[in-house]
Image (spheres, rainbow, N blue to C red):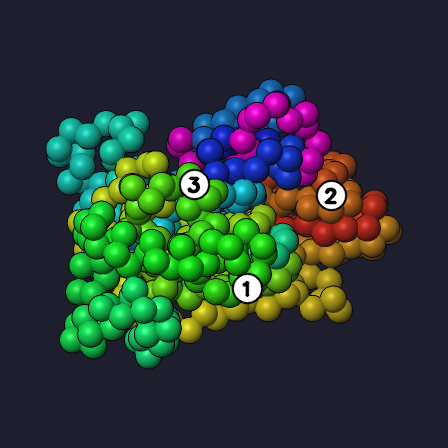
């Protein structure tokens, strides 16, 4: 037996929606409960449960007992841990302005917080583990996010178009982006009110009448204040980021890769997310969670970024692996019609999640039937078949090919 049923874990963060993930998983949603993320992987804080000989055990425990399931190349490079974490997200309210550290930064930060005696469960803890967290996402709906700094020229154009932000124009012309951003993130309420409240007043009627384009940062300023219940008396410096960062719109099936240090924030929509196995998030605003501006400023990558959109998997490509520079993970999309058979080979421990329809996985004399919202773990170095039962597609998380 080398293919096992796998069950993930739900995260009930307050920004999550209430229906999408329960519908995907075919479970009954509890009234007023938020279903933000579905985790599939072996992160110590929320490991998936694997069914072995009709007994459930944490995937972390299974891999500790049978590390060969990861594959030799994975163990050589990443040790005894599953190197990636697969998620489904339902973003009903904007997430925090955030970024993730490099591997070296994560190792140093983790040690420093351990030395300070900060408990791993402490909400003021920044480094939850010693790993980096590059990540990719594929949109499951129209999806809006912030991603990296716009060019300095574009930022200046944005600021000049709004009288209350004109004082920031002279500031940016004299400073590099890092110094400029640091000053903004440390602005007091008087400064924030002077910059933002005139924009709010000027655009409130247009926003309420749905007359603002979603590509307009003014829309996201008012939307976020509304969705997160941010008052004019207690503004958040993260709101200024709508005028500094790229506002990216992904169509269903498109994606984006976010490397260490790139500031970003998910604004609205559902997606598949695949990342290195880490929960290290350094936040810079728009969140009730711990915000660590010094850590943010020590890690942030202030390069001017032109968003590089991952294209939709072409319809004629029945098996398609999305291109990213990640070394810790890769994501493959497998389409199938009823009766269509694909021959597959695992080059590492894999997690397969059915997104639409249903399929049968055959490996030697073993057959598992897997429907929408269900997943399996597949050991490394195994040949198996995917046969479509009901037309749809699945995604498979694995290590990149050599």
Q: Secondary structure at mark 2?
A: strand
User: How busy is the neighbourhood of tag 1: few (under 14 within 10 Å), some, or many (20 plus)?
Assistant: few
Asked if 274 appears above or below 56 in the picture, the reply is below
User: Along the horizontal axis of the image, is 107 left or right of 309?
Assistant: left
Asked whether 61 or 38 is in front, the reply is: 38
Q: Relative to residue 145, is residue 103 drawn left or right?
A: left
Q: How many marks?
A: 3
Magenta span contains residue 4: no
Q: Residue furthest left?
A: 116
Q: Which residue is mark 3?
A: 228
Give me the C-alpha separation between circle 2 and circle 3: 43 Å
Tag 2 near tag 3, CB within 8 Å: no
Q: Earlier in the sequence, mark 2 or mark 3?
A: 3
Q: Would residue 3 be found to the left or right of residue 359 on screen?
A: left
Point out the tag, 2 or 1, that comes first from the N-terminus: 1
Of labels 2 and 1, the one closer to you = 1
The residue tagged 2 is 361
Q: Main secondary structure of the magenta part?
A: loop
Residue 329, compared with residue 379, is above or below; it is below
How packed mark 2 is, by other alpha carbons closer than 10 Å (few <14, some 14-19, many 20 or more), is: some
- Circle 1 is placed at which residue position? 213
Give the image location of residue 268, x and y in percent. 53, 50
Pinpoint residue 36: horizontal percent, then vertical percent: 52, 37
| Residue found at x 77% / y 43% | 358
Residue visible at 34% across and 65% down?
A: 244
* Nearer the observer, 241 or 169: 169
> What range of the chain is rendered magenta?
23-45
The mark that comes first in sequence, 3 or 1, is: 1
Residue found at the very far top of the displayed protein: 55
Marks 2 and 1 sit apart, C-alpha to C-alpha, by 45 Å
351 and 45: which one is in front? 45
Q: In whole angstroms, how far apart are the C-alphas of marks 3 and 1?
A: 20 Å
């Amino acid at each position: 037996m080398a293919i096992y049923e796998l069950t993930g874990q739900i995260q009930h963060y307050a920004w999550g929606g209430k229906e999408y993930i329960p519908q995907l998983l075919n479970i009954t949603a509890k009234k007023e409960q938020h279903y933000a993320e579905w985790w599939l992987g072996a992160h110590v804080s929320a490991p998936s449960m694997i069914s072995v000989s009709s007994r459930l055990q944490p995937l972390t425990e299974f891999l500790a007992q049978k590390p060969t399931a990861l594959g030799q190349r994975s163990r050589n490079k990443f040790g005894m841990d599953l190197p990636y974490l697969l998620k489904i997200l339902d973003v009903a309210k904007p997430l925090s302005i955030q970024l993730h550290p490099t591997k070296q930064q994560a190792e140093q930060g983790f040690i420093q917080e351990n030395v300070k005696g900060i408990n791993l469960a402490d909400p003021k803890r920044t480094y939850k583990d010693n790993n980096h967290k590059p990540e990719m996402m594929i949109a499951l709906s129209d999806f809006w996010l912030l991603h990296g700094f716009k060019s300095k020229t574009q930022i200046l154009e944005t600021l000049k178009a709004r009288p209350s932000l004109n004082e920031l124009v002279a500031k940016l012309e004299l400073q590099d982006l890092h110094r400029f951003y640091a000053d903004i993130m440390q602005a007091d309420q008087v400064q924030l009110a002077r910059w933002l409240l005139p924009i709010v007043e000027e655009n409130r009627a247009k926003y309420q009448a749905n007359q603002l384009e979603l590509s307009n940062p003014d829309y996201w300023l008012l939307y976020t204040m509304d969705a997160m219940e941010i008052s004019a008396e207690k503004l958040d410096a993260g709101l200024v980021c709508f005028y500094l960062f790229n506002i990216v719109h992904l169509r269903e099936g498109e994606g984006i890769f976010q490397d260490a240090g790139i500031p970003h924030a998910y604004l609205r929509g559902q997606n598949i997310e695949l990342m290195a196995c880490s929960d290290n998030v350094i936040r810079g605003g728009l969140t009730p969670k711990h915000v660590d501006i010094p850590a943010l400023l020590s890690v942030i990558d202030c390069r001017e970024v032109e968003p590089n959109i991952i294209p939709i998997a072409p319809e004629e490509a029945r098996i398609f692996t999305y291109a990213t520079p990640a070394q810790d993970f890769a994501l493959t999309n497998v389409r199938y019609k009823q009766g269509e058979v694909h021959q597959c080979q695992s080059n590492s421990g894999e997690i397969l999640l059915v997104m639409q329809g249903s399929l049968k996985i055959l490996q030697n004399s073993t057959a598992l039937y897997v429907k929408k919202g269900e997943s399996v773990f597949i050991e490394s170095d195994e040949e198996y078949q995917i046969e479509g039962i009901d037309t749809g597609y699945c995604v498979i998380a694995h290590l990149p090919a050599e």
